[in-house]
Image: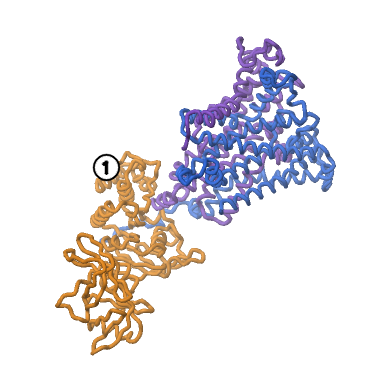
Amino acid sequence: MAEVSLHKLNKRFEAFHAVKDVDLQIRDKEFVVLVGPSGCGKTTTLRMIAGLEAVSDGEIRIDNTVVNEVPPMDRDIAMVFQNYALYPHMSVASNMAFGLKMRKFQKAEIEERIKRAATILGIESLLGRKPRQLSGGQRQRVALGRAIVRDPKVFLFDEPLSNLDAKLRVQMRVELKKLHERLGTTAIYVTHDQVEAMTLGDRVVVMKDGVVQQVGEPLELYNTPANRFVAGFIGSPAMNFAEVTLAESGGRLVAEAPGLKISLPPELAKHGRTNLGRGATLGIRPEDIHIAGPEDDAGHCFDASVEVVEQLGSEILLDTRVGSALFMASIDPTIRVRPHEKLRLALKPDRLHLFDAESEKAL
Amino acid sequence: MIEGALWRRWVFYNIPLILFVFVLLFPFYWMIVTSFRPDGELYRPWNAMNYMPFWTNKPTLEHFRYLFEETDFGRWMVNTMFIAVVSTLISLFCGVLAGYALARLNFPFAGSLGTVIFVTYLVPQTLLFIPLAEIIRDFHLGDTPWSLILTYPTFLIPFCTWLMMGYFKAIPKELEECARIDGASRWKAMLYIIIPIAVPGILSSGIIAFTLSWNEFIYALVFLSSPEQKTVAVGVTSELIRGDVFFWGSLMAGALLGSVPVAIVYSFFVEHYVSGLTGSVKG
Amino acid sequence: MTVTAVPDVAGRRPAVRLRKLEDERWLAFALLSPTAVLLGLFIAYPFVEGVLLALSDAKVGDPGHFVGFANFAKLWDDNIFWTSVWNTFWYTGVTTVFKLGLGLWLAMLLNRHFRGKALVRAFILLPFIIPTVLSTFAWKWMFDPTFSVINWTLFHLGFISQRINWLGDPGLAMSSIIVVNIWRGVPFFAISLLAGLQTISPELNEAAAIDGARPWARFWLITWPLLLPVTLVVMLFSVIQTFADFQLVYVMTGGGPANATHLFATYAYQIGIGTGLLSQGAAVSLAMFPFLFAIVVIQLLYIRRVEVR
């Protein structure tokens, strides 16, 4: 068990600056997820923590010891790779024993640990098999088992679920979560899938272009994204954005765009006034839009024409056109809507987000 | 495959294939028949009436007896085997390590060193045999098996290195990284993870290296002089031809027996041999 | 969390020597050094030595003196040398064309499913793996002026009435040698090209057939361009081996009759080892270098161009 801290961490590959000044304090027993689009530097950061990439600048500490120059074998970490990296010439048991043998554990202790890990993961019957005789899900478990037996200070996960099919992925996600609760080992998990990030992470780190955009608990990221990128990245379907101009109108701050005129709630208006007369981006999540009813304030309603109707069973997703912007709305599945229909939609004013047009930071 | 009627298949595929196989294998048949024919039958002019070239009714082991009793043929076989095995082992050792370094490690000049290996792979033995003979003499290695054991690796190592590079490159990098995180040093990760996975490649390289050194001729011809030091190919060439006189029966018997070890090794590892051969031209 | 004594990573560091091997550069250095020593000692050094030798007048038992380009000047006026140069090019050119053509044909014959395919493939490679000197003796015996089985067959089929002195006639001797070289080389071409053919998805050919391409067009427009990279590499190896060939000619004719079938290597051997004029022999084999170098460079450039495309 350990704390991991990154201080002004940088990685340059010749001309390419892959990781820029990353600062991060990971607490003992915490499950932290690094998430972002491909090329955002999340995997490089993980590999630096593992010791597989040299640090260009900055510091990595594990349990308050600087490990920049410590080779991976001495860092006491375990890593689960995207392709599992099971040693193909060894049985499942030997795969799990390898790390312990390298550390010169007693034979009895090795067997004991393998047995315990196999029981936790339900792979007792596979111990004698070779990796090529296993299904994708089984391989995944073995890779996890290999990490567990080591009882390391830190678990590192590099997109471990992305090679599984959708159903298995959901199932393994739950198991991973349970596993972490049971073992309580500090874990750092890299993924490009924001759903995985939200469901697994105690805290989530959103990265883009090598820069940390926001660090926070999942709901914090969802409710108060620090900038437009985080707002668009977290949540599915993604947040709707409209470029608006801000203007005072009858004591209220109004965001205007073609076909759209929304009056902002007082709390948001307070921040928005700093941008008066300048451009801003208005954001609203699809789940915060509904079909307008009599109780909705006219200042929170707008007209939309439906282009595509996606029936998901539990909800209906409407792709609508609002002026020149495209808005997606998630509505009650009992309502019948047809393509090309004109609708009046309303949004929840307290769920509105406003971003500076230039810096894209939340206002 | 798109194929037509039965007769077309015979005309366009089966008959040509049978011809190919016949021509490619006939000299071996000829070798075998000759080595069992008594001299009286062998030296009958080709246009003599009772000349029946393709079969013999009176097979004899006389030529084999001559080979073992009148020449050092047994010694030559042992010499060739010893030289081939030791030089193959040396080349495998060097080639596996060098191939690993060139394929999987980042270090300055890795690319240009790979090119150097490829270029030496292309250097034929006949380019250097005269100066090499001088060097062998200077090192006092002349007329010893070591003159060949140490020089054969010059063409075997580049080959093994090149082939092993291909095999090593195909192994995912994560395996090694995982081993290093699991507590293995780079050296141990190579030894316990990567090299065991590359065993098929090592077998292929080893088998081809073995056949190549068994096949080598000019170094053996130039560096060895006393009859009891010779390899099969050189011994057969120099001891079974006296001036203009060829001992054809024994020559063919020697050629047959000299081919057997290679043929046996080959027959056990055909697939490895073929995959090595095709791997070596993939570049 | 209770504070327990965590084993310090610095506490169990292996020896300094092993630690150095954690650095990729040191490890690479260690792994490459045996190879570098052997290749340096027995390739680079002999190459330098060979150049020095070719510029001297050394003979067996006489280290000799520096004589500049005298050996090469002598070669310039040497008819046998020019015959060997011509022979080498002719030998390489003709055999390569035939090996490629026949090898490709054989590869296509093998690129189907039929019973006993694995066995046929295994047997076909025999000429390539059996030591050249030994199988060449079988051919020499088949070409024997008096006891030739080939003559016997041709005679009984009614093609000839006189014996043919295969290895005794200068022109025929070269052709005979060429036949043997092709015989030995075809399997290598066939098996390598077969491997290349097997990487071409049959769907491409089927798609072309549906698009209306005849077999001949399918070959030229689909198979051949996709096979070209492998073909070029196979040719590169074959050309170099053939250009520098020694064993085959040494056994078949020894360069005769009347020095008509010498190649670079056999002529170098005859002068350098046969008559003991080391410096001259070294000059002959070194004369091979610029040609080989040019061939390799041209082929590699062409291969790169094809692979980029």
Q: The purple chain is which one?
A: B
Identify which residue, C129 or A336, lies in the foreground.
A336
- The part of the image, by quadrant, that contains residue C145 is top right
In this rendering, the answer to whether A8 lies above or below C215 is: below
Left or right? Give the position of A275 relative to C43: left
Badge 1 sits on which subunit? A
* Residue B94 seen: no
Q: Give coordinates of residue A43: x percent, y percent.
A: 39, 60
Q: What is the drawing colour of chain C?
A: blue
Q: What is the drawing colour of chain A?
A: orange
Q: Give coordinates of residue A137: x percent, y percent.
A: 30, 48
The quadrant in which the C terminus of chain A is found is: bottom left
In the displayed orientation, state which residue is furthest to the front: C212
In this rendering, the answer to whether B13 lies above or below A188 is: above
Identify which residue, A39 or C195, lies in the foreground.
C195
The residue under label 1 is which amino acid type? Answer: Glu
Left or right? Give the position of A289 relative to A361: left
Q: Which residue is drawn at 53% across and 36% down?
A: C108
Q: Residue at x 45, y 47 (%)?
A: B171
